[in-house]
Amino acid sequence: DIQMTQSPSSLSASVGDRVTITCRASQSISKYLNWYQQKPGKAPKVLIFAASSLQSGVPSRFSGSGSGTDFTLTISSLQPEDFAIYYCQQSFSPPWTFGQGTKVEIK
Amino acid sequence: QVTLRESGPALVKPTQTLTLTCTFSGFSLSTSGMCVSWIRQPPGKALEWLARIDWDDDKYYSTSLRTRLTISKDTSKNQVVLTMTNMDPVDTATYYCTRVVPAAMHDYWGQGTLVTVSS
């Protein structure tokens, strides 16, 4: 199975901050990487697919980059509604594994 | 409008078999490229991908759980069923069904159903 490792596991940031979350795959997955946001008590929501494509309806402050084994999710200016847990998921081969999550908290 | 809804028991006893049903609307599992997956999340923990069934009836399973899982579909009823045998308290989790589109992206999710395993 492909292992997905996110860092950091949690971070504290202020509204307006630029936030970067990284995700590393245990083998090359080309650009087959998706990012999800999950708020408390809610189902996850897809933000980015294919490493850098913004899902319809997602604010442009979210962006993704990377290929191969290293990927990043960037929030250019953190908003109050962005405090949540973020997960990466590889879509290269089954089983389609998730990272352990990164919790973004208010500083 | 795409919707998915999970249904099944809220409480199961250890060693029992769990049967969950995903009832969906707004798309057809007979359409090329469409898939439905199950994902679970233990309380306070990360997402864990479980299984997927494709429009052409291809099936995929979690490596660690494959001996306990079975996924099936009833296209005429717009339903996907997941069974998990030999339930254990560590299987306590919220179980989600999702629509999966090309790029293996889970673009729509059900609200999830909490299953507790306890005697």
Image (tube, coloured by chain):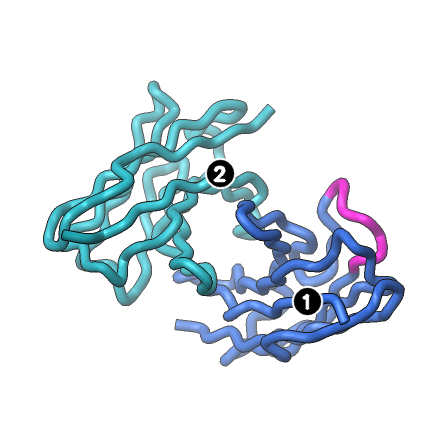
Chain colours: A blue, B cyan
Under mark 2, the amino acid is Gln
* Residue A88 pos. (x, y %): 58, 64
Of the pair B18 and B49, the residue shown nearer to us: B18
* Residue B69 pos. (x, y %): 23, 51
Q: Main secondary structure of the magenta part?
A: loop
Using the image, determine if residue A18 lies above or below residue B76.
below
**Chain of the residue on which disc 1 is drawn:** A
**Residues flagged by tags 2 and 1 on a common chain:** no
- Measuring 27% from the left and 66% from the top, which residue is drawn there? B64
* Residue B38 pos. (x, y %): 39, 47
| Quarter assignment of residue A65 | bottom right
The furthest residue to the top: B76
Under mark 1, the amino acid is Val
Of the pair B41 and B89, the residue shown nearer to us: B89
Q: Which quarter of the figure is the N terminus of chain A placed in?
A: bottom left
Q: Which quarter of the figure is the C terminus of chain A placed in?
A: bottom right
Query: What's the magenta region?
Result: A56-62
- Which residue in the structure is indicated by mark 1? A104
Left or right, A85 with reference to B12: right
| Quarter assignment of residue A25 | bottom right
